Image (cartoon, grey):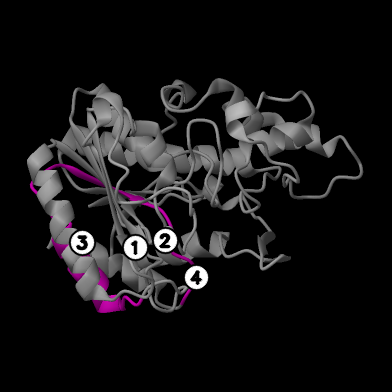
Amino acid sequence: MRAFFNPDQLLHRPRTRLSGGELRPTVETPERAERLLEALRDAKVDVTAPGDFPESCLAPLHDEQYLDFLRKGFEEWSRNDGNGPEMRASAHPVRTRARVPRDILGRAGYYQADASCVLMADTWSAARASAMSALAAADHVLRTGEVAYGLCRPPGHHATRDLAGGFCYLNNSALAAQMAVSEGRRVAILDLDVHHGNGTQAIFYDREDVLTISLHGAPEDLYPFYSGYADETGIGAGVGKNFNLPLALMSGIAAWQEAMERARSAIAAFDPDFLVIALGLDAFARDPFACMSLRTDDFARLGEMSRVAYPTAIIQEGGYPTDELGTNLTRFLDGLTG
């Protein structure tokens, strides 16, 4: 198996997130990528720097004005001496009535869904490098048929066409899927992050060529709150191509296995010829978010149940610093690859 990672992904170093009404230290730090990278190397996985794919690869899924905001927004923000080192919105529109403002604070509210996706001087460089790792993993699978892993940080599955959120800026898993679509493949995305992949769902919700499946904590109780319900099944050409499998908070492996059986049945019925696994490791019982009760051995079982007879690219989503983070990754990969 080949893994892809660009050191520029470590450049994004957010300081805080808004939690409980206070600015507290964030958990989406370079440390999480460093722990995963160390585990891959200890497991003798070949880790390669991705090639530099053209930014036109981002255009099918992300609005150009939004990309321009990610590229240049912090520089504009910094021209005001009163602004701090993290660009965080203080006003958010009702999107159904909103227009894109001229003022940078207004654009921050328009393009940032929440207070966790701050922009800093090197956010664009890191997000772009993360997307390149996802594209490199998909490209490797397309060319060789081998399983490949994109160590993507910042993560991506909460990013929509023109909205950052939940630590995510570019939707890495969706970009990997779109690369396969552009090569004529039918694609299924299996999202195993503890939080619903709302960005991925939004991007493909009206499409028939990509099946989206997400296992996650019940959105009544967990971010992103406003999507991820079981009755969201797609619209237009995408009707029946979106499956949400919400789980009660603190569920253990039995509930996850039951949901995985349903996911496997949906994938088999769709019969894709390319699979993207959006891998979150934040269902771990000791993850900082502590939403589920999975143990390290359970990730091996999830890996086994994710093994299908289709070319597969794994794209890293959530999973935050614990002593077991790297081991949880390698146990999943061992289960997947047998």
Give the numbered dot on residue 259: 3
Residue 146 vs residue 94: left or right? Answer: left
The residue indicated by pointer 2 is 37
**Disc 1 and disc 2 in contact, CB within 8 angstroms:** yes
Residues 181 and 256: in front is 256
C-alpha distance separating marks 3 and 1: 28 Å
Residue at 69 percent across and 60 percent down: it is: 15
Q: Which mark is residue 167?
A: none
Label 3 environment density (alpha carbons within 10 Å; few <14, some 14–19, many ≥20): some
Residues marked 3 and 4 touching at CB (< 8 Å) = no
Mark 1 belongs to which amino acid? Leu
Q: Secondary structure at mark 1?
A: helix
Q: Which mark is residue 289?
A: 4
Q: Is residue 133 at least partly visible in the picture?
A: no
Which stretch appears magenta? 293-322
Res. 83 in view:
yes
Q: Which residue is mark 1?
A: 40
Amino acid type, residue under disc 3 in the picture: Ala
| Label 1: few (<14), some (14–19) or many (≥20) C-alpha neighbours in 10 Å | many
Q: Nearer the viewer, mark 3 or mark 2?
A: 3
Q: CA distance from mark 3 to mark 4?
A: 21 Å
Residue 146 image position (x, y, % from top left):
17, 44
**Label 1, label 2: how far apart the Cα atoms are:** 5 Å
Residue type indicated by callout 4: Phe
Work out how far the residue at label 4 is from the one at label 1, CA to CA, in angstroms.
23 Å
